[in-house]
Amino acid sequence: MRPTVVAVALLSVACVVARAEPPAPGPGPWIRVNQVGYLPDDPKVAVLSGPEPLAGTFRVGDFQADIGPDQGAWGPFAHNYRLDFSAVRGPGRFRVRFGEVESPEFAIGADAYASVPDALLGFMRLQRCGDNPAPGEPKCHLQDAIDVYTDEKVDLVGGWHDAADRLKHMITTSYCVAALRLVDDEGAQAEARHGAALVKKLHPRPDVIYVQIGDDRDHRPPATLWHDDRSDYGHGPGGPRSAWPATGKPEGPKYKNASTGKASLAGRCAAVMALMGDVETARSMYRLGLDNPGVAMSVPVAAPHYYGESTDWDDMEWAAVELYRATKEPKFLEDAVAHADRAGDNAWMGRDAHGHYEFFPYVNLAHWRLHELVGPEVQARLAGYYRTGLERIRERALKNPYRIGTPMVWCSTNDAIAFATQARLYEKMTGDDQFRGLAAESRDWILGRNPWGVSFVIGVPEGGVASRRPHHMFHRLANRLPVGGLVDGPVTKEINDSLKFSPFEDDPLAPFQSDFAVYHDEFADFSTNEPIIDGTVSLLLLLDVWHR
């Protein structure tokens, strides 16, 4: 297990980091690379993009090769070329060069990603609720919360703020705890313990589980840091926040979600508790899921937007798998297999679009956790469920030079990471490496090999071209960059155009916007540049899986 590097964590909070300004767009061409770098055995492909046809050789250190055939027009570029330098194994620091054009510097070596996990965990520590990363300031939200139906005071202090806002979604919190528990890192385990304390408190009675603490009343002015939240939930400005229990039916005082049950949340929380060794609570949550099939969604109050889910089968599978691992009771294994076959493959894979969090958490980790526990016949079915989704993504990815096959929806970085994670888990389950190259290309998309040439991880790599004006109050109000947070990432122009933003200065990334996708490294753009806890943890899990 990697030890936690405290110095890096403090730097992440203080946000005193070296970072590069995006280069002036100029006439092109541009070379896009993964700015963090590559492991020695990784596939390594840069993309050379520009407005005019090109020919000639490119160089990486002593290696050189022809730029190859024109891949055609795509996105904002009329001409694109794939520069394969997989033969370069390092170790060292490198740039890709074509004539007078060069890429940002990147690493090749076994330690290329050594500093990234600590940056991601630093962001999670910054997001803690019931705590405060601002030196000398009081802890936040120590009055969480008041049940909206009973007016009962419920202890729901803890967990993480979901994104730039201050409310807490248990849909994402429960996933983050479970995923962190699966990461082989001391810092990740500490963060899992922090989140698990809140997940346990969500279930104070056998028939109750809370889906949300606070709501979108949080979004009203004034904008503040965590500790100075003046939101009024009917108990005075800065008073206790609302605790929303999952009821199994559509909820919301004006706008309604589409909830149908409690099992999606209860199942995922049961998996958390089993992973953390609290079998008694896990059993109770699992029973709640069995008794209340269907999905629990976040609750809209001031606006009609909410986190949706489409199935509870993957969550109940995960609960049963982890309960079997914890107890070795055969009934849980039987249940896990039955839930797995109902869950099947991941329906979003291959689509042009999907609803907001409709298929969260985008990759069914329960199939992987179940695979080693069952016989060859079930193993083949589980692998087939993964492979079917991967094949649909591959069909889309091979049609463009950046090999991105996931949809440009809100929080699109989640989708790209989920594909890469599923591909790597499939390879570990089967030994079949046919998707490894595309998995690397999705990872590289996150870290700068995209049309904008920007890493979607705030401040990572240090000194690189990464998100530096995120939609986050610590950046806006305290001049502290929330290093390590993964931002939502690009969305289609149609989605972006449908939203209302505060005005921002001329867009330095304007030459790289297209109908296919838009990304703004601007505070105002909450659709593409807001950091999210679930995506950050998903990237941490992907990197952990990649290095196993």
Image: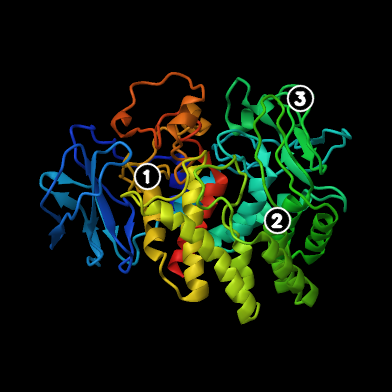
Front in this rendered view, residue 131 or 80 = 80
Q: Going 15% across and 44% down the picture, which residue do you hit?
A: 101
Residue type indicated by callout 2: Arg
> What is the basis of the colouring in this image?
rainbow
Q: Which residue is mark 1?
A: 455
- The crowd level at tag 3 (other Cα within 10 Å; few <14, some 14-19, many 20+) is few
Which callout, 3 or 1, points to the residue nearer the camera? 3
Q: CA distance from mark 2 to mark 3?
A: 28 Å
Q: CA distance from mark 2 to mark 1?
A: 30 Å
Front in this rendered view, residue 531 or 475 = 531
Residue 3 appears in the picture as rendered: no
Secondary structure category for the residue under label 2: helix
Front in this rendered view, residue 188 or 358 = 358
Q: CA distance from mark 3 to mark 1?
A: 39 Å
Secondary structure category for the residue under label 3: loop
Q: Going 21% across and 56% down the picture, which residue do you hit?
A: 94
Residue type indicated by callout 1: Ser
Front in this rendered view, residue 351 or 64 = 351
Q: Which residue is mark 2?
A: 268
Instruction: Please tell me which of labels 3 and 1 falls first in the chain.
Output: 3
Secondary structure category for the residue under label 1: loop
- The crowd level at tag 1 (other Cα within 10 Å; few <14, some 14-19, many 20+) is many
Q: Could you say which disc has been placed on residue 254 in the image?
A: 3
The number of numbered badges drawn on the structure is 3
Residue type indicated by callout 3: Lys
Q: Position of residue 168 (x, y in %)?
A: 67, 40
Q: Position of residue 191 (x, y in %)?
A: 60, 54
Residue 327 appears in the picture as rendered: yes
